[in-house]
Structure formats: structure tokens, C-alpha cells
């Protein structure tokens, strides 16, 4: 089986996940409506029962959005183990390393899509309808964000995903993988804290301490992503499927 066909199979499988689409569209709708309620200044002066109820629903929707943004890639990462799809793919001649990168690419693609639908799109809809000028201010603000900050956010997301993927691979998609992921997060954060503290004390807390801290954080995420990715590939290559 060709690698491109495997990637198309992953796309097809994720596109036809009706439950995930229903959840995403429902959360997107509630987030958009809740955004209109929050942006309306009149109800804040004289709060109505409907406004208060909608605000409470919006708060729960935001919490549900964050939970979904984590559980969505987690469920996508472990579904092939649960359905015995991975063993069939490997038996068809697909390299385990190639499959790893295909799986990571497809999962990251749909995770990014979920972020756009649940966070960015509702925000833009509210800004466009509420005040068009806020859209230009929003993009103007974001374009002025430091490149280092963008790199930290992106690599932080990728390093978190690599830990999640590695935890799933180690226990072959079992539910206990969530606890392994939490264990990875705690251990690596403690190690990073110690290293950051030692470097900061040795370098001194001068005027450039913020830049030094950002650089350390960037390197931490990059190193975590590389190490977790290598561990995941090595475990997958030796795993009995």
C-alpha cells in the first residue's frame, strides 16, 4: 500500500467521524452565541435571566471546548490500536516509521481544524458582526506579536502532542495512556524548572532575563518534541502488533 493512500485513508476516516463533527459544530454555535452575549454591553448593566443563562452556558462551552481540543487528538491517536487497524496496515507492507509520520500529520491537521472551528471562527464572526474595526485591530495586534512568542506557542502545542502520541504508543492505545501522558508532563516540567532555575541564576537576572527565559522555553519544547518523537518511533518499531 502506498503512503499517500494511507494518508487519504486517515483523512477519510477522520472526515467521516460524525460524532466529532456534531460536537464541534455544537460547541462552535454555542461559542459564537455566547460571544455575542459577552460582547453586548447592555445586558451587563441590566442583566436579564436569558443573558445570565447564556453566559453560564458559554462558560461551560468554553470549558468543554478546551476538553475537546485535548480529547480529540487523543481519541484519534488511539483509535487504530482499538480497531486493530494498525496491525493490518503494517501487515500490508507499510513502514512503521512512515505510518507514524502519516498518523501524526493527519492528527495535527484535524486538531488545527478543530482549533479554527471552535476558537478562531467564532471569535471572527463576533468581531465582524459586532464591530468591523475590531477585526483589523485583532489582526494588527496578532501581526505585532513577537516571533519568539509564536514559536513558543507552536512548539508547545507540538511537544504536548508528541508526549500524547508517545504515551498512546507505549501502551497500545489503552486508556491508561492518559496517566502516562500526565506523568511525562509532570516529570519533564520539573526537569525543565530545575534547568531553567540553574541557568537563570548562573546568567543573572539582568535586563534580558525575559529573552533568556523565552529562549529556554523554546529549546525545552523543541527538545521535548524531538525526544518524545524518537521514543515513539523506537517503541513502535519494536512493538508486537
Image (cartoon, rainbow, N blue to C red):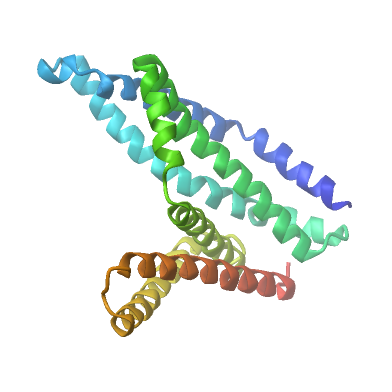
The residue lying at 43 percent from left, 54 percent from top is 149
Residue 68 horizontal/vertical position (percent): 45, 42
The residue lying at 55 percent from left, 35 percent from top is 20
- Looking at the image, the residue that sits furthest to the left is 46
Please state which of residues 64 and 227 is positioned toward the viewer in this rendering. 227
The correct choice, above or below, for 25 with respect to 51 in the image is below
The correct choice, above or below, for 72 with respect to 161 in the image is above
Of the 4 image quadrants, the one containing the C terminus is bottom right
Q: Is residue 194 left or right of residue 147?
A: left
Residue 4 horizontal/vertical position (percent): 83, 47
Please state which of residues 174 and 147 is positioned toward the viewer in this rendering. 147
Q: Is residue 15 left or right of residue 155?
A: right
| Quarter holding residue 128 | top left
Q: Is residue 7 left or right of residue 40?
A: right
| Quarter holding residue 66 | top left
The correct choice, above or below, for 84 with respect to 112 in the image is below
Residue 217 horizontal/vertical position (percent): 42, 67
Residue 153 horizontal/vertical position (percent): 45, 53
The residue lying at 68 percent from left, 70 percent from top is 233
Amino acid at each position: 500500500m502506498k503512503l499517500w493512500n494511507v494518508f487519504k485513508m486517515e483523512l477519510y476516516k477522520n472526515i467521516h467521524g460524525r460524532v466529532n463533527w456534531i460536537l464541534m459544530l455544537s460547541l462552535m454555535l454555542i461559542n459564537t452565541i455566547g460571544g455575542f452575549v459577552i460582547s453586548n454591553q447592555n445586558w451587563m448593566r441590566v442583566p436579564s435571566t436569558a443573558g445570565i443563562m447564556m453566559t453560564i452556558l458559554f462558560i461551560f462551552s468554553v470549558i468543554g471546548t478546551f476538553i475537546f481540543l485535548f480529547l480529540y487528538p487523543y481519541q484519534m491517536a488511539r483509535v487504530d490500536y482499538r480497531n486493530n487497524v494498525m496491525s493490518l496496515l503494517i501487515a500490508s507492507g507499510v513502514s512503521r516509521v512512515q505510518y507514524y509520520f502519516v498518523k501524526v500529520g493527519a492528527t495535527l491537521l484535524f486538531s488545527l481544524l478543530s482549533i479554527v472551528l471552535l476558537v478562531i471562527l467564532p471569535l471572527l464572526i463576533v468581531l465582524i458582526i459586532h464591530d468591523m474595526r475590531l477585526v483589523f485591530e485583532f489582526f494588527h495586534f496578532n501581526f505585532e506579536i513577537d516571533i519568539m512568542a509564536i514559536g513558543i506557542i507552536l512548539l508547545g502545542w507540538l511537544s504536548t502532542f508528541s508526549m500524547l502520541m508517545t504515551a498512546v504508543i507505549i501502551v497500545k492505545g489503552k486508556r491508561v495512556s492518559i496517566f502516562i501522558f500526565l506523568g511525562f508532563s509532570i516529570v519533564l516540567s520539573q526537569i525543565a524548572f530545575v534547568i531553567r532555575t540553574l541557568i537563570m541564576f548562573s546568567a543573572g537576572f539582568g535586563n534580558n532575563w525575559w529573552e533568556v527565559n523565552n529562549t529556554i522555553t523554546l529549546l525545552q519544547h523543541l527538545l521535548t518534541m524531538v525526544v518524545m518523537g524518537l521514543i515513539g518511533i523506537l517503541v513502535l518499531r519494536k512493538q508486537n502488533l
